[in-house]
Image (cartoon, helix red, strand yellow):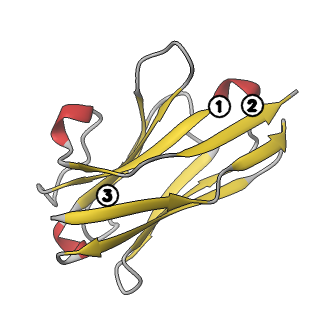
Amino acid sequence: QVQLVESGGGSVQAGDSLRLSCAASGRTFSSYAMGWFRQAPGKEREFVAAINWSGGITNYADSVKGRFTISRDNAKNTVYLQMNSLKPEDTAVYYCAADRIASRTSASSTAYHYWGQGTQVTVSS
């Protein structure tokens, strides 16, 4: 079992940057691949980015490629999502998730076993 707590959300202007953090507790953090998903009002949850256990392999949704960067610090049990050049369409609740298959970087929410409570990101034009 692993518990996930997101932080770093907020309200920003278009073009600004934010860095989200997800702190994990419980079993060994490096045993999990990690992902970020988001859900906007009235929409389904969608994949944003994922990273394997070592940080050596990443995967991004096309909509954020080149603007967002996922990273992890296994010594701090934390995964990050650096979000640059934010757009109003990035407005959503952002969730981090843990996948027990540490080697993969799945874009499917069904691959993930544990979820955080989410943090709100609002981007105004």
Q: Which residue is mark 2?
A: 87
The amino acid sitting under disc 3 is Ile
| Left or right of residue 32: residue 51 | right
Q: x, y percentage for residue 3?
A: 29, 64
For the point 71% across and 54% down, the residue is: 18
| Left or right of residue 37: residue 112 | left
Viewer-closest of 43 and 57: 43
In which image quadrant can residue 59 be found? Answer: top left
Q: Which residue is mark 1?
A: 90
Classed neighbour count for the residue bearing mark 2: other residues with Cα under 10 Å, few (<14), some (14–19), many (≥20)? some
Classed neighbour count for the residue bearing mark 3: other residues with Cα under 10 Å, few (<14), some (14–19), many (≥20)? some
Quadrant position of the N terminus in the picture: bottom left
- Furthest residue toward left: 101
| Disc assigned to residue 108 | none
| Disc assigned to residue 57 | 3
The amino acid sitting under disc 1 is Asp
* Measured Cα–Cα span from mark 3 to mark 1: 23 Å
The amino acid sitting under disc 2 is Lys
Q: x, y percentage for residue 33?
A: 24, 58
| 23 relative to 95, above or below | below
Asked if disc 1 and disc 2 are in contact, CB closer than 8 Å, the reply is yes
For the point 59% across and 47% down, the residue is: 68
Q: Earlier in the sequence, mark 3 or mark 2?
A: 3
Viewer-closest of 19 and 93: 93
* Measured Cα–Cα span from mark 3 to mark 2: 26 Å
For the point 24% across and 41% down, the residue is: 106
